[in-house]
Image (cartoon, rainbow, N blue to C red):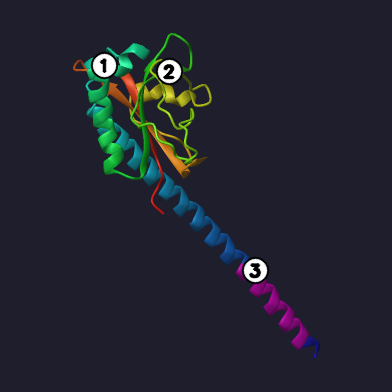
Amino acid sequence: VNLMKIKTIIFLILLCLTLIFSFFIIHLFYKQTSKSNLEILQEKVSNIAYVIALSVDANQHSLLKNLRDMDTVRNKIIKNRLNNFLNLYPEIKSIYTFVDTNKSYTWKYVIDARQPRDENSDGFIDSSEDVVPIGTEYDISSFPELQNAFKFPIAERKLRDSKWGKCISAYAPIFNKKRQAVGVLKVDMVPAP
């Protein structure tokens, strides 16, 4: 009888160790797969931002400096072109362009491709539903790596919560004809489920 108990105990110990090892392997596989999916998403949204940034007329964009420029033909042309991307790709929720400032970690909005829309159906366009005006400051101090967006496309390191659900943003340089970065384009995208 004692031999039977010892065999049962050994069997149970081996079974537990096998289960623990299996869960550990599954956890590692899941973690690696999730990381790969995030890297694929980062590359995708970075490429999208770069392609859209290539469509921006950098010389015209550079002429947009203040609130008076919001009603100019050049602003409307660039904004409409960017808005077409929003209409063509429903996973893209917003597109913005920025220029650098003399202040550390501070950019200024130039174009918000969205149209003002009463998203919460309260009969009013509040500040979160309106377009961001030219010249509004954008603090990037929480994301110092974004300074690299003037050199090459870059995506955020992880998904974040937004009013659209999980979202990821990417930034890409806007180059002039001399291949100088004169601005940055930002894309906010909700990944497909």
Picture quadrant of residue 168: top left
Q: Which residues are magenta?
A: 4-19
User: Which residue is label 1 attached to?
Assistant: 72
* One can see residue 84 in this view: yes
Q: Amino acid at mark 1?
A: Thr
Mark closest to the chain's N terminus, 3 or 1: 3
* One can see residue 65 in this view: no
Residue 125: give x, y in percent of width and height: 45, 31
Label 1 and label 2: CA atoms lie apart by: 22 Å
> What secondary structure characterizes most of the magenta part?
helix
Dot 3: element: helix
Residue 27: give x, y in percent of width and height: 55, 58
Q: Quadrant of the C terminus?
A: bottom left
Residue 98: give x, y in percent of width and height: 37, 21
Label 3 and label 1: CA atoms lie apart by: 70 Å
- Residue nearer the viewer, 190 or 50: 190
Q: Residues within 10 Å of mark 1 (few under 14, many from 20)?
A: few
Give the label on residue 17, or none: 3
Q: Is residue 122 above or below residue 186?
A: below
User: Which residue is label 2 attached to?
Assistant: 107
Dot 2: element: strand
